[in-house]
Amino acid sequence: MRLTPRQQSAAAIAAATALNLPFGTLYAFSVLLKPLEALLAIGRAETSAVFALATITLTAGMNLAPRLYGAMPPPLLALACGACSASGLFLAASAGSLAQFAIGYGVLFGLGAGVGFIVVQQGVNQTVKGKIGLANGYVVSLFPLGAMMGAPLFGWAVTEFGLRALLAGLAIFVLATCAIAAALLRLAVIRMHDGGADAAKAADAQWPLFLRLGAVFFLAATAGLMVMSQAAGIILAYGGTTALALAATSAITGSVAAARLAGGWLVDHFPVPRVAAGAHLWSLVGALALTAWASPYAAVPALAMIGMGYGFISGLTAAAIAQYWPKNAFGRIASKLYIAWCVAAVSLPVIAGLIYDRTQGYGAAVLMAAGVNVLGAFIALGLPARSRSA
């Protein structure tokens, strides 16, 4: 059965939804902090390092993806991603040491997620016409949306069945949803770009723009990933209950998902520099509010604002790539820009973990987040307002 262009777009978006939602539970990692620390007798810095490792391999997978989808059919790639990540989760579920857990969750799970993310995002950009900003905002919103749905389920499953059973169940779910994504990609018959000279030339011709957009993204991600990786721990540190921490993690990740969708939509209607600067300032207000009113109930909306600022920038970045560069270059440019996300994940989130281990608080880390948002807003104003793509 041959699909119409509109049906192809729908199938590509459905495939992205099926594949990205379970991988998005990476952003619910903060729910696993205390159970993991108790299980393996480790500290917050070590658990933060596992999250950082997962983001490194996720980024490595993103950069590997453009080479793979030119040589392998997208459906086969989706299945391979599911098998890789599921095997990693099974390994993590049986871990008796930090090293084994890090290899399973931090390496194999992250690698499969990274390849799959770029494969389905490129597929969407090859098929969707019109409001491409909104489409890209939706695709990147799926990760925090998966965390929003996963956080309460994780909290319940850990209490009822334990951390090992939770990870094994997630492995089965990842394998199943990747198989569904593979079927949808096969049905859509998406032609992925061949990674030819046009994509590489487009990237080389706009290095100043690439670096500025990457800096704006990096600075937002440092603050946002600190919140998303340790939201539950931060709420507890400010005196909140476990129930509040779980509810807040779900609410914060949901806010980030909505902000990512909105960030893509905003770029369809307003100049990129204004949206980017406004996003950083929004995050800044949240950081300053938490500094001024250090209580668990003030922390929830404040952390949501910090996360939303990152969410706006994340959706904006995907939409801006589609606006500034030709669509055949999307996967190549996006995968390189996500290196900034990786560097961000191993900076302030890890520093915040070290600060917590020494002070049992996050006050200094929140002030650092405020500082990077000020810098990010200033740099964002230098982005071009109009498309330069051919």
Image (spheres, rainbow, N blue to C red):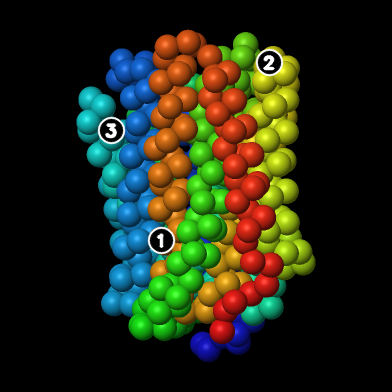
Q: Of residues 153 and 328, which is closer to you in this image?
A: 328
Mark 3, secondary structure of its residue: helix
Mark 2, secondary structure of its residue: loop
Q: Is residue 255 visible?
A: no
Q: Which mark is residue 101?
A: 3
| Residue 157 location (% of width, % of height) | 49, 29
Query: Quick check: 28 left or right of 270?
Result: left
Q: Do labels 1 and 3 touch, CB within 8 Å?
A: no
Up-down relation of residue 301 to residue 107 (above or below): above
Q: Residues within 10 Å of mark 1 (few under 14, many from 20)?
A: some
| Residue 164 location (% of width, % of height) | 35, 29
Say which of marks 3 and 2 sits in front: 2
Q: Residues within 10 Å of mark 2 (few under 14, many from 20)?
A: some
Q: Earlier in the sequence, mark 1 or mark 3?
A: 3
For marks 1 and 3, give the CA distance. 27 Å
| Residue that badge 2 annotates | 294
Residue in view at x 65 percent, y 46 percent: 377
Residue in view at x 44 percent, y 50 percent: 340
For marks 3 and 2, give the CA distance. 34 Å
Q: Earlier in the sequence, mark 1 or mark 2?
A: 2
| Residue that badge 1 annotates | 336
Type of amino acid under label 2: Ala
To which quarter of the image does residue 148 belong? top right
Residue in view at x 41 percent, y 83 percent: 198
Type of amino acid under label 1: Lys
Q: Of residues 368 and 310, which is closer to you in this image?
A: 368
For marks 1 and 2, give the CA distance. 37 Å
Query: Quick check: 13 left or right of 71?
Result: right
Residue in view at x 55 percent, y 67 percent: 321
Q: Residues within 10 Å of mark 3 (few under 14, many from 20)?
A: many
